[in-house]
Image (tube, rainbow, N blue to C red):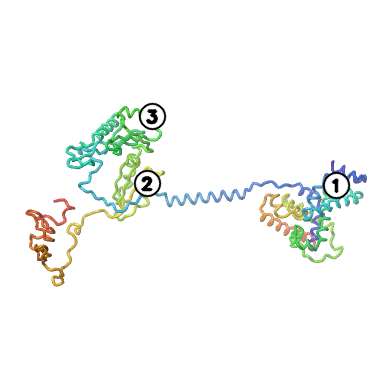
Amino acid sequence: MKNHELLDMIGDVNEDYVLEAGNNVGKPRFRWKTLAACAACAALVLGAYSVYRAAHPPLHGYTVLEGGGMTTLEDVKAPAGGESDPNTIPGGAYVGGDKGETGIDGTEYTVPGQDAPGQEKAAAQYDALMKNGGINAAAPNQDWYGGAWIDNSFYPETRLTVAIVDGFRTPELEAKITGWCGDGVVFQSAKYSHAYLDGLMEQVAPLLDGTGLSCGVGVDVMANCLGVDLYSNGQTIPDSILAQLAKLDPAGDAIRVRLFTGKLDTLTDDMVKGPAPAPVDPEARATPATTVDGGETVYHGEDAPADAVPGGAQPQDGAQKCGEPEEGKLAHYDLLPDD
Amino acid sequence: MEDNQIIALFLARDEDAIQAAQRQYGAYCAAIANGILDDPGAAEECVNDTWLKCWQSIPPQRPRSLKGYAGRIVRNLALSVRRADSAQKRGGGQVQLALDELSEVVSGGETPEGALDRQAFRAALDGFLANLPEERRNLFLRRYWYLDSVEQLAKRFCMSKTQVTTTLHRLRVKLRAHLEQEGFEV
C-alpha cells in the first residue's frame, strides 16, 4: 500500500470525527506532572539543605586582627577602672588628667581631673541618669537603656551621650532624661538594650570556658554590641564555638567577634637574658683594641677598662654600666618586676 | 441558514444553494484548501470547484452533513492539485511531510487492483479512531486529515512540538498494529 493511498483513505473516515476535530480548540492543560516534579525537586532541595545545615551549622563571622598579644603595659591607662581609681566614674567612663601628665594644651596636670571641668559635669549627669532613671550601673535593667558614655569629640567640651533602644526613643523620654541630667545630653539610637547585651554576655561566657582560648568579653556600649575578643595564640576558633555564637546572634550584629592572631607575649629566659653572645676569636678581630678620636682614647671590646663604655663616653658616678647587671638583678630586666 | 435548508436548496436545484453554502462553509473549506496548498489562488479555485462538485453530486447524494461532505470534497481536490504539481510534491509542504510520516505505517508496495476492500479498510480506520481518547483522535485527524503543521498542532493543543511529534509517532505505530490485527497487509 502506498502512503498517498492511506492519506486518501483517511479522508474517508467518519465525518463526525472530522467535524469534531475541526471544531476542537485545545484548552490549556494543568500540568500535574510538571507541578509534581517541581514540588518534588523543591522538597528535595529543602530536605538536602536541612541535612546540610544540620551537618554544617551557620558560623558567626569574626574579624581577624594580626598580632595583638595580650600585653599589658604598666603605663597604659585602662579606660575602665575600679572604684579605687579616683579618675573613673561608675560604668567605666574615664575622667582623665593624671597628676604629672601633660594635656593636649601642654599644661601639666597637678590635680586629677583638673583639665576637664566639662567631664565632671558629664560625670554628674551620668550619675543623675543612673539614679533618676532607676538604672543599676552594674547591671542595667531598663529596656530602653542602650548605654551611656562621655563623649570627648566635642573637645574642649565633653558631653554625656545616652543610647536609647529603637522603639523607645520618643521626645517624651528624651525630655525626661534632659530633666534628670540637665541640658547638653546627646541622644543616640541603639538596636540592643544594655540589659539584652548583658544577658548575652552571661550566655557567651560559659561557652568559652574550657576551650583553652584566651578571651575578653564585655559590652561595648558605643558600638552597641557584645565584644568578644579571642586571642588565638596559634589556635583557631573551633567551629562549634562560632556555631553557638551564631545561634545566640542570628542577626550577626549583637556580638562582635575579633580574633587576635599571633602568640601571647610571655617572657622567656631568652627574652630576659638576651641571646647568647657569639664567641669572639681574638685573632680574627679586625678592629684594634683602641683608637684615638680627637685626642681621646676610645676603647673597644674586652680591652676596655672596667669603667669605660662603648664609644668612649665615661660613665657617671653611680650610673649603671652598660651590659652589666646591677648587683643582685638580672640583665635586661626592664620587662620584669624587681622581685 | 441551517445545514439541512442548504441541502434542501441543492436537492431542489436552486442556484441559491451554492451562494448559501459559500456563505456558510466557504471559510471552512478555504482553511482546508490553504492547509494543503500554498497558493491562495489555487485554494480559492478548489473551494469554487467544491461547490460545483456539490451541485453535481446533490442529488443523487444526500449528505448527512454538508459541512463534512464539502470538507471531504475540498480536501480531495486540494490533494489532487498538489499531486498534479509534481515539483511541489517533491518540494515539501505539509502534504509531503504527512506522506513521509505515513510511510512508517504502510509498506509502500503496490496493492493489486481490487485486493483492498475500501469499505473494510475505512471501517478499520474508524475503529482505530473510535478507540482513541478524544484528544489523541483530534490530534491524529488534525495532522492527517486537515494536514496541520506540527507548530499549529502544538499551539492548538497546548503541547510542545516534541510532545506532538512523539504522540503522532506512537499513534502511527498503533495504527499499523491495528491494521495488521484487522488483517490488512499494509
Residues flagged by tags 2 and 1 on a common chain: no
Label 3 sits on a secondary structure element that is helix
Q: Amino acid at mark 1?
A: Arg
In the picture, measured across the screen, residue B166 lies left or right of residue A108, that is: right
Q: Amino acid at mark 2?
A: Leu
Question: Circle 2 marks a residue in which chain?
Answer: A
At a point 85% along the width and 63% down the height, the residue shown is B115
Residue A290 placement (x, y as % from top left) = 10, 66
Q: Nearer the viewer, residue B88 or B9?
A: B88
Residue A3 placement (x, y as % from top left) = 78, 62
Label 2 sits on a secondary structure element that is helix
Label 1 sits on a secondary structure element that is loop
Question: Circle 3 marks a residue in which chain?
Answer: A
Residue that carries the numbered disc 1 in the rendered image = B64
Q: Amino acid at mark 3?
A: Pro
Q: Is residue A197 above or below residue B81?
A: above
Q: Nearer the viewer, residue B169 or B59?
A: B59
Residue B182 placement (x, y as % from top left) = 79, 59
Residue contact between numbered discs 3 and 2, judged by CB atoms under 8 Å:
no
Q: Which mark is residue A171?
A: 3
At a point 82% along the width and 66% down the height, the residue shown is B110
Residue that carries the numbered disc 2 in the rendered image = A245
Is residue A158 visible in the rendered image? The answer is yes
Placement of the N terminus of chain A among the 4 image quadrants: bottom right
Mark 2 vs mark 1, CA separation in Å: 84 Å
